[in-house]
Image (cartoon, grey):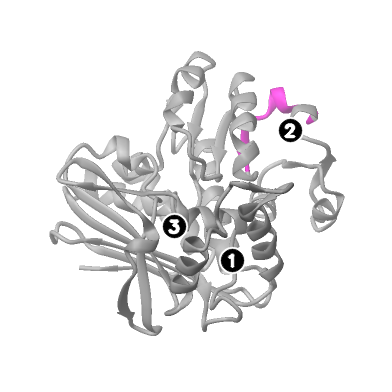
């Protein structure tokens, strides 16, 4: 995903990529590179903007470091800390922080913000998926993003809003069958992807559900119930650590598809939907496209002052402003992201 962002922005901007992995850097051609961590990155203090595309376990410290230097930050990591904890710091240093600026959360928040602030919708459902066209053995699913984060998605309580109140559900206890045109039978479950919406939407009801092929979630529930996702140490390792590694080993280059549908259940505003597929010509995953291009769009909007301000700036606030919303939507369309609006 970081490579997608770097390549996209390098078409118009002077980009410097830092990574501790030389293999990852070798995959980037025609872009300035630095082998090392973010704290050693040369010229960071002069950058107009920093895009953080790091694993969640290190993303927090990287964001804090960049904001402390007064740099605008667009961050695609989904982490369990409250992004508003950096609001005072960003304001004090005169910079802007857009957290969770990927696909979902990220683009899903932007669209939900358009419906909430622009159309007055107070009852919404977000459906999101990153999966293969057909079930893949042995789990019926191959992770399309960080494998450990996939397990988190099944084990972390999913927060949603009902009549202005935040509620929680355990994802593996909310598995429901559904059908989606073009995909047939799927299963949905509550997922914890509303992000900053939990703080910014003060009224109404909104829920995010993630989709998988039938059967996969039952396998995950079995593993969970047997303790394979437990962090309790058995000898020198925990079952969770072993599961993380085994999940990583299932990852392989298989064409994927990304799905997003944001529906105003109260009929106030149109339904937005996206179905994006693997880019076979450039060998870019759909999840990479959706996350990378969404983050690049937000970064570019900040660089061109389409998004401006100080402090923590949630992605849904982009939906408040017609200019910034249109900029992001057009940016994605120019990259062949098919955004359909119905109603």
- The disc, 3 or 2, on the residue closer to the chain's N-terminal end is 2
Q: Which residue does the image show at 32% across and 45% down from the upper left?
A: 319
Q: Which residue does the image show at 44% across and 57% down from the upper left?
A: 330
Q: Which residue is mark 3?
A: 330
Q: Which residue is mark 1?
A: 143
Disc number at residue 38?
A: 2
Q: Nearer the viewer, mark 2 or mark 1?
A: 1
Alpha-carbon neighbours of circle 3 within 10 Å: few (<14), some, or many (≥20)? some
234 w.r.t. 66: above or below: below
Query: Is 169 left, or right, of 310 in this rendering?
Result: left
Q: Nearer the viewer, mark 3 or mark 2?
A: 2
Most distant residue in the front direction: 235
- Which x, y percent locates residue 268? 15, 57
Read off the magenta span. 41-52
- Which x, y percent locates residue 236? 74, 47
- The disc, 2 or 1, on the residue closer to the chain's N-terminal end is 2
Residue nearest the viewer, comparing 232 with 243: 232
Residue nearest the viewer, comparing 222 with 300: 222
* Visible residue check, residue 83: yes
84 w.r.t. 226: above or below: above
Query: Is 272 left, or right, of 146 in this rendering?
Result: left
Real-space CA distance between mark 3 and mark 2, rounded to the nearest whole angstrom: 31 Å
């Amino acid at each position: 995903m970081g490579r997608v962002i770097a390549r996209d922005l390098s078409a118009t901007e002077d980009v410097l990529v830092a990574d501790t992995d030389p293999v990852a850097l070798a995959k980037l051609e025609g872009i300035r590179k630095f082998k090392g961590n973010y704290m050693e990155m040369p010229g960071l203090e002069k950058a107009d903007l920093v895009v953080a595309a790091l694993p969640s376990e290190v993303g927090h410290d990287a964001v804090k470091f960049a904001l402390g230097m007064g740099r605008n930050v667009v961050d695609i990591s989904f982490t369990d800390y409250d992004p508003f904890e950096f609001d005072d710091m960003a304001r004090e240093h005169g910079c802007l922080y857009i957290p969770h600026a990927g696909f979902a959360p990220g683009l899903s928040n932007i669209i939900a913000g358009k419906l909430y602030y622009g159309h007055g919708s107070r009852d919404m459902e977000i459906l999101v998926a990153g999966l293969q066209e057909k079930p893949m053995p042995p789990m019926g699913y191959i992770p399309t993003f960080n494998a450990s984060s996939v397990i988190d998605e099944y084990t972390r309580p999913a927060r949603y809003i009902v009549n202005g109140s935040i509620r929680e559900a355990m994802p593996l206890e909310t598995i429901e069958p559904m059908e989606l045109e073009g995909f047939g039978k799927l299963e949905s479950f509550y997922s914890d992807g509303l992000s900053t919406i939990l703080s910014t939407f003060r009224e109404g009801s909104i829920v995010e559900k993630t989709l998988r092929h039938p059967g996969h979630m039952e396998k995950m529930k079995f593993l969970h119930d047997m303790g394979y996702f437990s962090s309790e140490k058995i000898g020198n390792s925990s079952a969770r650590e072993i599961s993380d590694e085994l999940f990583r080993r299932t990852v392989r280059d298989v064409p994927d598809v990304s799905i997003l549908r944001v529906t105003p259940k109260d009929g106030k505003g149109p339904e937005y939907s996206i179905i994006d597929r693997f880019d076979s010509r450039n060998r870019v995953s759909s999840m990479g496209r959706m996350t990378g291009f969404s983050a690049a769009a937000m970064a570019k909007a900040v660089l061109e002052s389409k998004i401006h301000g100080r402090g923590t700036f949630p992605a849904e606030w982009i939906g408040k402003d017609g200019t910034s919303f249109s900029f992001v939507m057009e940016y994605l369309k120019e990259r062949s992201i098919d955004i359909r609006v119905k109603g």
